Image: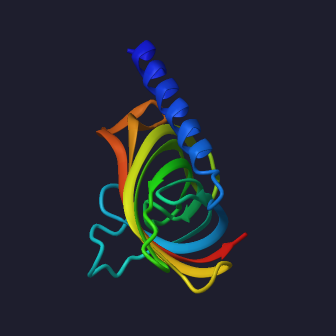
Amino acid sequence: MSTNVGRVCGAALFALALVAGAARDASAQGYISPFIGYDFGGDASCRELTDCEDKRLNAGVWLGVTGAVFGFEEEFGYAKDFFGIRPSVSSSLLTVMSNVLLIPRIGPVRPYGLLGLGLMKTHVELSPSSLFTADNNHFGWDIGGGVMINFGRHFGIRGDVRYFHSFQDFTVSFISIGGQKLDFGRASGGILFGF
């Protein structure tokens, strides 16, 4: 089982490197894009994308490069109180994902789809004594899409929806939480700074 996972991961990283190299053509452009959004569905405290009163803001940054059709992006995201607000319990989620983008250029508008692999790190702590703390690193994947709108070469906006899934079951102190894999969606928007 672990040998197959290692082969899949190695093949995926090789494919990511090829796409990143292909994106560095003469028309390639780098960008940095801070974002804000909220998580929904699955294990998030908000069960639906719309009609949710318990939204938990998250923030992060996307760093990437786009070519004429393909791109590559690194994502760093952080969500405080990911599992909701409960008395004497705090939680958070950190995502670090590497994504390949299919992003055709249609004038200043660039719709895109993405697929990637990376790390989802959860932290759960019982307060006030903090006698119980659980940190879990989950290897996972994400899929999603959105649109970038450029107002010139160095400035724009973007919005997207992504779905995140772990390969391993989510556990807290050796106890599997319902035998479930960590999964959730995220809706977010950001500002683009091109370079």
The image shows residue 96, relative to residue 159, as above or below, that is above
Q: Examine the image and state in which quarter residue 157 appears.
A: bottom right
**Measuring 46% from the left and 19% from the top, which residue is drawn there?**
7
Q: Position of residue 111 (x, y in %)?
A: 40, 69
Q: Is residue 21 left or right of residue 3?
A: right
Q: Is residue 24 left or right of residue 90?
A: right
**Measuring 46% from the left and 69% from the top, which residue is drawn there?**
105
Is residue 29 visible from the viewing direction of this image? yes
Q: Nearer the viewer, residue 69 or 87?
A: 69
Q: Examine the image and state in which quarter residue 44 appears.
A: bottom left
Quadrant of the frame with the C terminus? bottom right
The image shows residue 121, relative to residue 71, as above or below, that is above
The image shows residue 152, relative to residue 126, as above or below, that is below
Colour convention: rainbow
Is residue 162 visible from the viewing direction of this image? no
Q: Nearer the viewer, residue 159 or 193?
A: 193
Q: Residue furthest right?
A: 195
**Measuring 45% from the left and 30% from the top, which residue is drawn there?**
174
Q: Position of residue 117 (x, y in %)?
A: 48, 41
Q: Position of residue 139 (x, y in %)?
A: 49, 36
Q: Nearer the viewer, residue 183 or 126?
A: 183
**Marker count (numbered):** 0
Quadrant of the frame with the N terminus? top left
Q: Nearer the viewer, residue 17 or 93?
A: 17
Q: Residue furthest front?
A: 26
